[in-house]
Amino acid sequence: MLLHIQKSSKGIWGVLDRCKSFAYFHVSSQRCSDALSPANILYPLEPNISVGARDLQQRVPSEFQKKKSDIDFIIAKVQVGSSEDEVFQSLLQDPVCNSIQLSHDLVYKLLQRFKDDWKSALGVFRWAESLSGFKHTPDLYDILIDTLGKTKQLVKMRGMLEEMKEARLVTLDTVAKAMRRFAGAGQWENAVRIFDDLETYGLEKNTESMNVLLDTLCKEKKVEKARQMYLELKSHIAPNANTFNMFIHGWCKVNKIDEAHWTLEEMKGYGHRPCVISYSTIILFYCHRCNFNKVYELLDEMDAQGCPANVITYTTIMCSLTKSEEFEEALQIAERMKSAGYEPDTLFYNCLIHTLGRAGKVREAIHVFEVEMPSKSVLPNTSTYNSMIAMYCRRAREEKAMKLLEEMQKSEHCKPDVQTYYPLLKSCFRTGKTDYDLSNLLDEMINKHHLSLDISTYSLLIHGLCRANKCDWAYQLFEKMISQDIKPRYLTCQLLLDEFKQKNMDGVADRIEGIMKKL
């Protein structure tokens, strides 16, 4: 079936606007993913052309066809949404791909690029290992283990773990990632089983590995189970300060603050003095509940115990006050820290800039970024730029935000991430610039910086495009989400469903309703 593509009077992204029936618009999920390859998402097609999905990939401007870097060429070859075997075969049968000199750094970047797309990641991984002379390192395996776990491909993750075991490549980092992903999927028994089988992986059961298990269970709110495991193990594996700090964090996570305070006392009984981490964890608990009186009491107790708060503690409190819109109090905490003689770090400055921006003190925020940080030789990171860009976008100063983006792209210390672009994309919808500006930003994200769109960005784009009466483009992005196994939000599905019902496009509406039933 053909896609009837027309350029609307509003700009290059007005595709499919005049389609009156489902016959012109129906696209299978595979074809939709083809049409949404980087070349086709980010470059306009000629007007009044009827083309098939395969032709869409070939009709790209000369700018895209010029010589690409190795990573760009491989990414362009990968068909997002295909099975891992189709990705593998596509790369294996391409003579240009197979002439590329692979390095561990290149494969690392590819796996990072597809960290939210397990099919492409696994296909690339298998292709790389098939090439003569290339062997995956443990850290490359670990990235894939994490990707498979994050996308709930737990059977494949287990198989990859066994593969690593046969090659004796399993490290404690590998085990930590696998345990966390099992526990996160509700399979905490499998996390415990990995610990029980540690010797078969060539690893030792000791305090460090025990802490990995306990930390995993505590972070997934299985603190009672962690406590039970600890009581069974402590007779032959000695706890250390980290063990108790993990329990303090776990009890706080499940809202059992009395147990957290009791653990502080137990810690002392084992000869371990509570440290700034111990107290800061409990402070964070009270911050989340906006109980700042308790926070200040604990700050005083830390001083009395000879364990004064550090930069991280003060930054945590300041961020929480800002979240509660207690801006002046947050700025007072910043002054208290400076008065205590602590030198601010990048994370502190990031929070301070965010606080100043939220408080409407834009000049002060700019002064911190442009004057104070350089004078202290504190380098900005991606989050610093993100805070400044978000502040400018909230104030409708998009030109300033774009200049910062350009500066960031030239920086040797940090590069943009998805969060960098989020406020900029949002500004495009607010200002109605949903043609050239929006396409340029997406071009940079996908083709220049090789960023994968997350669910928040997809949702922003789909909702914004629907409001801009570009529902067909929104639907293509929706199909791309599905092909990448990113589960859409119910509200997003409902919005699209309503739009296509109004257009009497029953085929698309039925497709969306089918997806909604599976959510």
Image (cartoon, rainbow, N blue to C red):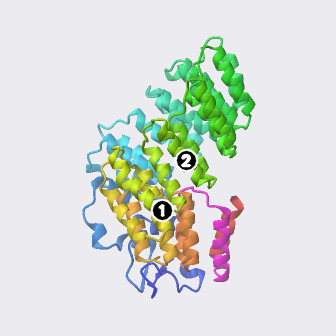
Crowd around label 2: few <14 · some 14–19 · many ≥20 (10 Å): few
Q: Nearer the viewer, residue 68 or 26?
A: 68
Relative placement, left or right, of 67 versus 447 is: left
Q: Quadrant of residue 389?
A: bottom left
Please give the name of the residue rendered at 48% of the width and 32% of the height, measured from the top-left corner: 163
Q: Which residues are magenta?
A: 483-507
Circle 1 sits in a helix, a strand or a loop, which is it? helix
Quarter where residue 251 is shown = top right
Residue 485 inside the magenta-drawn segment: yes
Q: Earlier in the sequence, mark 1 or mark 2?
A: 2
Q: Where is 505 relative to 290, above or below?
A: below
- Amino acid type of disc 1? Met
Find residue 140 and name its label.
none
Q: Which residue is mark 2?
A: 332
List the single residue furthest toward the top.
Answer: 236
- Is any atom of residue 217 visible in this view? no
Distance of label 1 from label 2 (alpha carbons): 21 Å
Q: Is residue 284 left or right of residue 175?
A: right
Name the residue type under label 2.
Gln
Numbered label attached to residue 391: 1
The chief SS type of the magenta part is helix
Say if mark 1 contacts mark 2, CB within 8 Å: no
Q: Position of residue 509 (x, y in %)?
A: 66, 74
Residue drawn 50% across the image and 51% down it: 116
**Horizontal and vertical percent for residue 259?**
73, 28
Indicate the quadrant containing the C terminus: top left, top right, bottom left or bottom right.
bottom right
Q: Nearer the viewer, residue 417 or 58?
A: 417
Q: Which quadrant of the structure image shows residue 188?
A: top right
Image coords of residue 61 (percent x, y): 31, 73
